[in-house]
Image: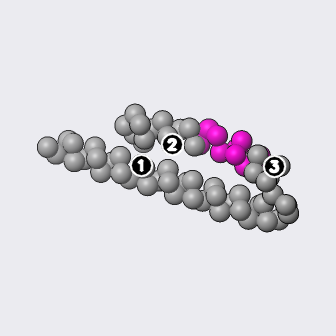
Amino acid sequence: MWLSSPFREIVDDVKRRLPYYKDDWTRGFASSYSRAIEEEEEAEKKLKGVCATLEIVDMEMNSWILST
């Protein structure tokens, strides 16, 4: 899927960094491993939701620009 530059950069950056965020979270901030896994999964869902939302906004912006 094609994204305009600012949105594409954000989505690509999040996707690229996600494994590192997960490693840091598990290693550095979690007091309990099972709780860290749950929090990690929830954070990953939220990040994926943000990426999906940005892709939708970008498609809508492109449609609007092309129609004007």
Q: Position of residue 33 (x, y in %)?
A: 85, 61
The disc, 3 or 2, on the residue closer to the chain's N-terminal end is 2
**Dot 1 and dot 2 residues touching (CB under 8 Å):** yes
On the question of residue 2 being in view, the answer is no
State left or right for residue 34 relative to residue 57.
right
Neighbour tally class for label 1: few under 14, some 14-19, many 20 plus, Cα within 10 Å? some
Let me know if residue 14 is in the magenta part: no
The disc, 1 or 2, on the residue closer to the chain's N-terminal end is 2
Residue occupying image coordinates x 30% and y 51% = 60
Q: Which residue position holds label 1?
A: 55
Q: Which residue position holds label 2?
A: 11
Which mark is nearer the camera, 3 or 1? Answer: 3
Neighbour tally class for label 3: few under 14, some 14-19, many 20 plus, Cα within 10 Å? few
Quarter assignment of residue 17: top right
Mark 2 lies on a secondary structure that is helix
Residue type (three-letter) at the residue carrying disc 3 = Gly
Residue occupying image coordinates x 57% and y 59% = 46
Q: Position of residue 13 (x, y in %)?
A: 56, 38
Let me know if residue 18 is in the magenta part: yes
Residue type (three-letter) at the residue carrying disc 2 = Val
Mark 3 lies on a secondary structure that is helix
Residue type (three-letter) at the residue carrying disc 1 = Glu
Residue occupying image coordinates x 25% and y 47% = 63
Q: What's the CA distance linking mark 1 and mark 2?
A: 8 Å
**Dot 3 and dot 2 residues touching (CB under 8 Å):** no
Q: Position of residue 34 (x, y in %)?
A: 82, 65
Task: Please report the bounds of the magenta region as a residue range.
Answer: 15-23
Mark 1 lies on a secondary structure that is helix
Point out which mark residue 26 bears.
none
Quarter assignment of residue 8: top left
Q: Which residue position holds label 3?
A: 28
The disc, 3 or 1, on the residue closer to the chain's N-terminal end is 3
